[in-house]
Amino acid sequence: MKAVVQDRFGPPEQVLRLTDTDRPEPGPGEVLVRLRATSVNTPDWIAVAGVPYVLRLSTRAKGAIRGTDIAGTVEALGDGVTGLAVGDAVFGSKWGKGFTGAGTFAEYTVTTAAQLIPKPESISFTDAAAAVMSGLTAHAAVVDAFPTGPGTRLLVNGASGGVGTFAIQIAKHRGAHVTAVCGPGNLDLVKELGADRAIDYTATDFTTEPDRYDAILDNVLNHPPRRAFRALAPGGVYLPNSIGNSGGLLAGLAKMASATLLGAMGRATVRTVDGNFTPERLAAVAALLETGAVTPVIDRVYPLEETAAAVAHMYSHRARGNIVIEMGD
């Protein structure tokens, strides 16, 4: 099969290459999926770049196939798999407990049957791929970690990325008032997605404004948590997500640790966004896609042979919405 293989850590264009490799075979409880689409997420570029360097101690580079989001058709079933048949359209993930073996930047991948659900016919493979990690994480944030609803005020910092664009739409569908923080070039986008107010972070610092929010979903961590807490209403919840891109990954990790410590000290309520796959959570996202309540925002679709460029685009931190890789028919 064709797959994009990593040779070493470094810039995506220098360390990723398309090659022929053996097709994986499903073991007991596993499913071989012929991929039609996948997407690029933050963990992918981190694993390719190998930064911060301490991650290299626990992450293999040579021969690795990255990617975790799955959208495709069942090619073969391992022993003991029930409820699925060859030819079924499915989507799901290799992330979390199901993250084993080679990833999804390839024509085929294997994952546990428990990490897949049927893909509704009305959802394209491209949209399904875009909705996995980003949709799961956004749903975990604004439904599970902080249940948005009528009357709740949510601020999404980093609102124009994959998670942010899903979070705006899901929260608005649930009746929340949403303030979206993004760059000047994406203000119209977040308004089109339903944001009640859009803030240009290059012109306005939301932490110094008088407005207060019941929850802040922070996808970029470009402010120290102590400052971000200023924008919370009494009893408000801070939801740090990702490790930011301001000051490097080590700085982002330090801010995550600071938020957790300050939360433990009672300075604010801090909750982890656990965006791992559950069939119920992905089914809820799929239902929103089916009804049209949520539409994936896709920046660009790349063919498999241009995966290095797709990861580099993600690495630039300039993506509007999601970056998808298609494998074709």
Image (cartoon, grey):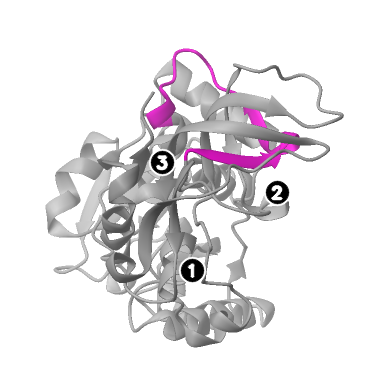
112, 289: nearer the viewer: 112
Residue that mark 2 sits on? 98
Dots 1, 3 in contact, CB < 8 A: no
Question: As shown in the figure, which amino acid type bears the numbered disc 1?
Answer: Ala
* Mark 2 burial class by Cα count in 10 Å: few <14, some 14-19, many 20+: many
Give the mark count.
3
Give the extent of the magenta segment: 107-127
- Residue at the far top: name it: 121
User: Which quadrant is the C terminus positioned in?
Assistant: top left
* Mark 1 burial class by Cα count in 10 Å: few <14, some 14-19, many 20+: many
Residue 275 drawn above or below residue 120: below
Image-quadrant location for residue 25 = top right
The verdict on residue 90 being magenta is no
Question: As shown in the figure, which amino acid type bears the numbered disc 2?
Answer: Gly
Between the residue at mark 1 and the residue at mark 3, the CA separation in whole angstroms equals 24 Å
Question: As shown in the figure, which amino acid type bears the numbered disc 3?
Answer: Phe
Residue that mark 1 sits on? 47
Viewed as shown, does residue 171 lie left or right of 208?
Answer: right
13, 215: nearer the viewer: 13
Q: Which of disc 1 and disc 2 is earlier in sequence?
A: 1
Picture coordinates of residue 122 (x, y %)?
44, 13
